[in-house]
Image (tube, rainbow, N blue to C red):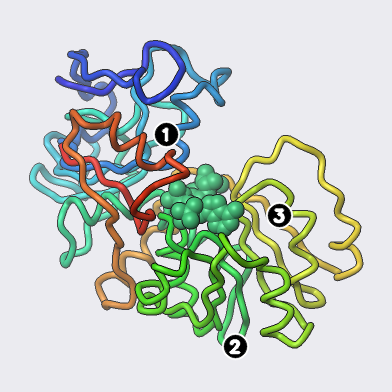
């Protein structure tokens, strides 16, 4: 089968379409899936660059979203049949989704919502599990809460805004002025242009100095240290970002803040409620662009290009 392989760590140029051995079922609970679409996550770029080199052996097939069709099932698999349309996030550290076929355990699989195409479905598993984990499981966001979701136009942000809105929260986000209308359509109540304005000053002005109940850190840098300046008393901060440099949390102490650190693992249980919200129409995938499999380098260049002429809005999809 064809797969996109990484033989050496580096930039997008190390991604190569190559012929690799097709996986076969070797355990009774395994399922073989024909991958129809995948997506590009910042995590794929980190793996490609070698940020997780201690957890992988070269060559690597990366990719953290699968939407596709069941081809074959192990002897103990009762729930799934060849032809079933499934989506999931492959186990971190194992073979990834940038391939024509992917072998997984039946416990990872969810049925694709009936109203999604394969391309739309590939936008969901990793970010869907992540937004449920950060907003519901950790932040326990509820009706009437206020939340700041920076990076509202990104893969996480476009889904998080919709989920926060469906939970009844008041949503602040950051995004370029040109994306104001589409971010509003997703459910954002206040949009701060992070290229021209300071989100802390803006939040303090909008909330009359009170701050917001929940801040999601999708940015890194000094966000963990600074966030308490825009946080309400007893607020919650949820960070998705691996931050190697030490952080001064004195302001967090002053605010009686609670911090949550999230590194999403394969999370079918957290994808299920997202699937239901998609089927009810409360949430929809946002697609920035669709690249054919062999243009994976251009897809990685787009997510990493900080000077994009057209701003990113939603997920970048790889069509197989
Ligand atoms: N821990 C986990 O389990 C987990 C899971 C998923 C994602 N993540 C992390 O979450 C982050 C977001 O992921 P993603 O998939 O949404 O990425 P993405 O699709 O690349 O989107 C990033 C967004 O952030 C915006 N942005 C960049 N710098 C910013 C800044 N200083 N202030 C405000 N906004 C800024 C970008 O806007 P511009 O176009 O204007 O720059 C873009 O809209 C990444 O760091 C990713 O690694 C973690």
Question: Mark 1 to mark 3: distance in Å?
Answer: 23 Å
Seen from the viewer's position, the closer of residues 247 and 237 is: 247
Relative to 165, residue 153 above or below: above
Question: Mark 2 to mark 1: distance in Å?
Answer: 35 Å
Q: How many marks?
A: 3
Marks 2 and 1 close (CB-CB < 8 Å): no
Q: Residue 44 — which label?
A: 1
Q: Residue at x 65, y 48 (%)?
A: 220
Q: State which quadrant residue 34 falls in.
A: top left
Using residue 68 as the reference point, say whether residue 153 is left or right of it. right
Q: Residue 171 — which label?
A: none
Residue 2 pos. (x, y %) = 17, 21
Seen from the viewer's position, the closer of residues 40 and 266 is: 40
Q: Nearer the viewer, mark 2 or mark 3?
A: 3
Q: Earlier in the sequence, mark 2 or mark 1?
A: 1
Q: Residue at x 56, y 60 (%)?
A: 195
Q: Residues within 10 Å of mark 1 (few under 14, many from 20)?
A: some
Relative to 257, residue 184 above or below: below
Q: Nearer the viewer, mark 2 or mark 1?
A: 1
Residue 222 pos. (x, y %) = 74, 50
Element under label 2? loop
Q: Residues within 10 Å of mark 3 (few under 14, many from 20)?
A: some
Q: State which quadrant residue 208 falls in.
A: bottom right
The residue indicated by pointer 2 is 144
Image quadrant in which the C terminus is located: top left
Residue 221 pos. (x, y %) = 69, 46
The residue indicated by pointer 3 is 223
């Amino acid at each position: 089968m064809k797969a996109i392989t990484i033989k050496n760590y580096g930039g997008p140029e190390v991604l190569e379409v190559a012929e690799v051995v097709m996986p076969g079922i070797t355990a009774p609970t395994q399922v073989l899936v024909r991958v129809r679409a995948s997506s590009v996550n910042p995590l794929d770029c980190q793996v490609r660059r070698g940020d997780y080199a201690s957890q992988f052996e070269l060559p690597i097939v990366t990719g953290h979203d699968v939407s596709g069709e069941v081809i074959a099932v192990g002897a103990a698999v009762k729930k799934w049949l060849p032809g079933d349309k499934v989506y999931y996030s492959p186990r971190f550290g194992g073979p990834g989704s940038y391939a024509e076929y992917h072998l997984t355990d039946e416990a990872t699989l969810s049925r694709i919502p009936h109203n999604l195409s394969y391309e739309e479905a590939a936008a969901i598993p990793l970010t869907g599990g992540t937004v449920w984990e950060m907003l519901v499981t950790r932040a326990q966001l509820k009706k009437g809460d206020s939340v700041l979701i920076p990076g509202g136009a990104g893969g996480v942000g476009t889904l998080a805004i919709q989920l926060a809105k469906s939970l009844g929260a008041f949503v602040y986000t950051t995004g370029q002025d040109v994306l104001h209308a589409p971010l509003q359509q997703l459910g954002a109540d206040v949009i701060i242009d992070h290229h021209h304005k300071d989100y802390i000053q803006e939040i303090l002005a909008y909330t009359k100095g009170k701050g917001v109940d929940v801040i999601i850190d999708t940015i890194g840098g000094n966000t963990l240290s600074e966030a308490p300046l825009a946080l309400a008393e007893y607020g919650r901060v949820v960070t998705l970002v691996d931050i190697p440099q030490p952080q001064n949390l004195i302001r967090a102490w002053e605010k009686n803040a609670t911090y949550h650190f999230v590194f999403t693992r394969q999370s079918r249980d957290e994808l299920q409620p997202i699937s239901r919200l998609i089927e009810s129409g409360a949430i929809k995938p946002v697609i920035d662009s669709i690249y054919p499999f062999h243009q994976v380098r251009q897809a990685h260049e787009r997510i990493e290009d900080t000077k994009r002429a057209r701003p990113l809005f939603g997920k970048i999809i790889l069509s197989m």
